[in-house]
Amino acid sequence: MRSWLCFPGCLSLSGPSRVTGIVGGSLRVECRYQEGFRDNNKFWCTPPCFWKTVETRESEREVRRGHGSIRDRPVSLTFKVTLESLREEDAGRYRCGIDVPFSRNPTFQVEVSVTPGCLSLRGPVSVCGREWESVSVQCHYDSGWETHKKWWCRGAQWASCQILVQTQGSEREESGARVSITDDQRNHSFTVTMQELRQDDTDTYWCGIESEWEAALTIVGSQVSRTTTSRLAASSRPHSRTHYVLLVFLKVPFLLGLVGAVLWLEERQRDPAAQWEEPIYANLSSELLTKDAPI
């Protein structure tokens, strides 16, 4: 394995100097390294780094330990560290580093802050929408984040969620597959709109802000509730009740009358005397009409 020397001040490793997360949430730190360290193990530690919090191995590009994980991406010459289920005691100084045998390990210091609440980004906890219609989610951020990228991603875990759409640091609307995002920098808010909602859109979503080093500073989770089925079922019940009323008051009497008429006709065909009753009544009625007529 090739060995590399790193002296203080060299640019073999770089990353964000500060990241912020909220209690119970997650944060992600991305560190970049030079081409010569592609095959070296990467780690995350707390100074003076006598032991590593989490470290990759030659055969394992992604390693999880406790509520932290690390993933090496040699293709982009980056590795990402994710801390989940943050606690206030997680705040402090950390270092992302590269393991270089028989030499001083290059490291980069990152200051991690954990706040009791979401101070940089605020949004709804859950939203509801009907199938084939649209739903909008508005997230508000503090001053100072106007030109940073805003994004909307899908997935139960923030660290592994899939980004569906994101801004480019401007107010221009960006669109994806049935989803769009617009940043209103004057009012410090951005709006995400999902169109033509489907049942399989029901999931957990996150709105977030990225720093220069693609480390999400604050996040708010929102969930699209599946309400279409219950609303459609409720709207169909009055029609069923109307059909029942029509069946009782109109269709049943009609059917009973029809059956009675058929039985009456059959009874008349069985009784021979009934065949002579009608002419007699006809003759009587004709005689009465003749007597009443003027001469």
Image (cartoon, rainbow, N blue to C red):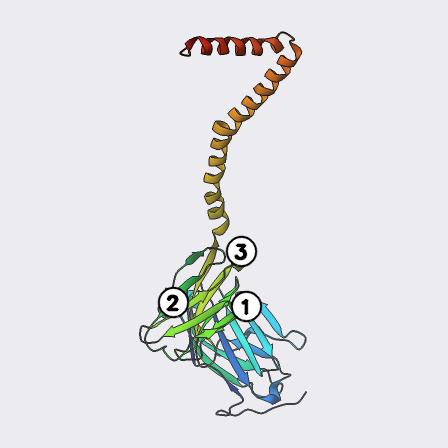
Name above or below for residue 11 compared with residue 135.
Answer: below
For disc 1, the neighbor class at 10 Å (few under 14, some 14 to 19, many from 20) is few
* Viewer-proximal residue among 287 and 260: 287
Q: Secondary structure at mark 1?
A: helix
Quarter-wise, where is residue 121 in the image? bottom left
Name above or below for residue 175 compared with residue 243.
Answer: below
Nearer the viewer's eye, disc 3 or disc 1? Answer: 3
- Can residue 108 be seen here? The reply is yes
Left or right of 71 in this view: 211: left
Left or right of 265 in this view: 251: left
Q: Amino acid at mark 1?
A: Ser
- The C terminus is located in which quarter? top left
Residue at which label 3 appears:
199
Q: Secondary structure at mark 3?
A: helix
Circles 1 and 2: CB atoms closer than 8 Å: no
Q: Amino acid at mark 3?
A: Gln
Left or right of 7 in this view: 17: left
Q: CA distance from mark 2 to mark 3?
A: 24 Å
Residue at which label 2 appears:
139
Residue at which label 1 appears:
160
